[in-house]
Image (tube, rainbow, N blue to C red):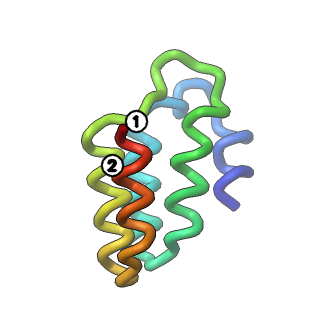
Amino acid sequence: WAKGAVDEADDWAKNSVVFNGMIRCAGEAHDLDMAFGLFEGMFRTGTKNVSPNIITFGSLMSACERVGDVKATGRVFELME
């Protein structure tokens, strides 16, 4: 689903604010796979205005916390480097 949402989005929707919101919503839905899929989708957009920022990583960390996945939290720290 995440890949389809990214691929089918109009160019105006391909920005960090939209992605951060979708990642946050995935986390609130306890769908960690979707949150990480959306994160990875940020790099497939082909646009300059989509790049992870502090909000992105915070949203991913919150998603990990919601599902209680400590290992995934470590993955987020690795992605931040």
* Of residues 14 and 60, the one drawn nearer to the viewer in this rendering: 60
Residue 25 falls in which quadrant of the image?
Answer: bottom left
Left or right, residue 1 beside residue 24: right
Q: Secondary structure at mark 1?
A: loop
Name the amino acid type tagged 2.
Phe
Q: Going 70% across and 61% down the picture, which residue do you hit?
A: 1
Q: How far is disc 2 from disc 1 in space, using C-alphas?
A: 7 Å
Dot 2 or dot 1: first in sequence order is 1
Instruction: Please count the marks in the image.
Output: 2
Left or right, residue 40 beside residue 78: right
Name the amino acid type tagged 1.
Pro
* Of residues 32 and 72, the one drawn nearer to the viewer in this rendering: 72
Specify the farthest residue to the bottom.
68
Left or right, residue 44 beside residue 38: right
Dot 2 crowding, Cα within 10 Å, few <14, some 14–19, many 20+: some
Q: Label 1, on which residue?
A: 52
Q: Label 2, on which residue?
A: 57
Left or right, residue 24 beside residue 22: left
Residue 14 falls in which quadrant of the image?
Answer: top right
Mark 2 near mark 1, Cβ–Cβ under 8 Å? yes
- Quadrant assignment for the C terminus: top left
Q: Going 44% across and 79% down the picture, which residue do you hit?
A: 30
Q: Position of residue 9 (x, y in %)?
A: 65, 38
Q: Position of residue 80 (x, y in %)?
A: 36, 42
Q: Position of residue 51 (x, y in %)?
A: 44, 29
Q: Is residue 64 above or below residue 2?
A: below
Q: Going 57% across and 64% down the picture, which residue do you hit?
A: 34
Q: Going 39% across and 55% down the picture, which residue do you hit?
A: 76
Q: Secondary structure at mark 2?
A: helix
Q: Which mark is residue 23?
A: none
* Of residues 65 and 10, the one drawn nearer to the viewer in this rendering: 65
